[in-house]
Image: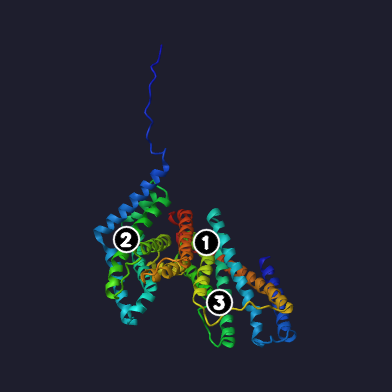
Amino acid sequence: MRDKTILVLSWFTALLLAGNLAIMLLVLPDEVEQGPIFRIIFFHVPVAWTAFALFFAAMISSILYLVRKNLKFDSFAAAATEVGLAFGAANLLTGMIWGRIIWGIWWTWDARLTSMLVGWIIYAGYVMLRRAIEEPTERARMSAVVSILAFADVPIIFFSIKWWRTQHPQPVVYGSGIMSPAYRFMLFFNWLPLLLLGIVLLLIRMRQEQTGREIDALRREVHAF
Amino acid sequence: MAVPAVRRAPIRTGMKRPRIRFFRQVLTVAWKDLRSELRTKEALNASFAFALVILLLFSIAFEPTEDQTREISGGLLWLVFAFAGALILNRSFARELANDCLDALIAAPMSGAALFLGKTLANFVLLSAVEFVCLPVFGVLYNVHWTQQALPLAGVIALGTWGLTVVGTVFSALTVNLRLRELMLPMLVYPILIPCLLAAMQLTAPLVMGEPYTAELSQWVRLLVAFDVIFSALALALIESVMVR
């Protein structure tokens, strides 16, 4: 049943993405100032939204684990965080490519870039911690605590770094640009397949996590004899 | 038959004042930690020596002039404090591993919150002691008169150190059973501490330079206080899940 759900969702996502790509490349005109590279925003921004949605889901699932002590919630939180990290990386990389073309530099310590990087590193620490703990329930408890602390920290990081950067003006300033309705529509409409892609990856990763746990349990049973 | 009225003295079980009992337990744990640290001095010595080495390396790496030193003083001092703090925090729970002391502490008739707060308090005192020695050394080695705003500076250092120790103690408990404990603790703690360290650095530099406290600085104080309050509350709420065996 779950296999079929994943398969159907994947196909739907692929078709949507292909359709959106065709519209982006063939129908929508180049942006006046930035030229063709502007289209990267249709991926850059929605993957960040997806990443935050996944980190949020991971936090909720971590709280549920601490309350219910059901390892299913732990698998969900682990899978959501890992997929969120992949989307976060996609956001950073697409941002860097865009920055190289428009700003002429790969990286600048601008508020949003710095915040995203710090958040990404915190969640990378979460994944490292999971690898370091072998006992499943202990791993679940510890990583749930880290997930909650990490998500509580994200808004504080964003505010603090924003204040820090506004005190020291940077050469690169984010303009509050106005986007034409067609672009805006594409931005939101491309979020749908990317969010679905996140869900598909989440389901696959969650199943791996549960299978891994079953194998572990079986191995222990064999050793017990 | 008339029964003489007996005035019973109230029974003191300690249960009537749970709050006082809680703080007594906190102080007991903190005092125990401080005493065992003062007897061995292993974390204190290591932490202070490490702080000294970093102060030395900074001056060799950047050879700052007096003005430059004042400008980077916030960043320099807090990096030193954070690195020195990691050594103290690493030992905080690792010290209890020998002879299964940690299991005994967790089994002791007190809440995980009391154990955690006691440990945090001890770490706070130890790190403050290291900082208290580091500041004059910094002043001498870098030729900086840092005492003009001593009181506000002390306040900022206390707030920053509390944030550092409260988050650090949670992660000290979290990572105590790991093989890569010494590596994992700073890996996890420093990124989470960024708002706290950032605010402390922004406040420390002008205060070391002797500039008066301005309204512009107050937003960083608010951030620091908010960080301390939020993470103290979260740590107390979550610590039972960390301490379970």
Which numbered disc covers residue A89? 3
On the same chain: label 1 and label 3? yes
Left or right: where does residue A16 sit relative to residue B8? right
Residue B38 lies in what quarter of the image?
Answer: bottom left
What whole-number distance in Å separates the C-alpha atoms at marks 1 and 2?
28 Å
Height in image: B163 above or below B140? above
Left or right: where does residue A198 sit relative to residue B32? right
Height in image: B29 above or below A93? above
Tell me, yes or no, if residue B47 can be seen here: yes
CA neighbours of label 2 inside 10 A, class few (<14), some (14 to 19), many (20+):
many
Viewer-proximal residue among A159 and B66:
B66
Tell me, yes or no, if residue B177 can be seen here: no
Q: What is the residue that sits farthest to the top in this orientation?
A: B1
In front: mark 1 or mark 2? 2
Q: What is the residue that sits farthest to the left in this orientation?
A: B39
Counting from the top left corner in percent of width and height, residue A88 is at 56, 74
Counting from the top left corner in percent of width and height, residue A1 is at 68, 65
Chain under disc 2: B
Q: Which residue is mark 1?
A: A148
Height in image: A66 above or below B132? above
SS category of the residue bearing label 3: helix
Q: Which residue is mark 2?
A: B126
Residue type at the position of mark 2: Leu
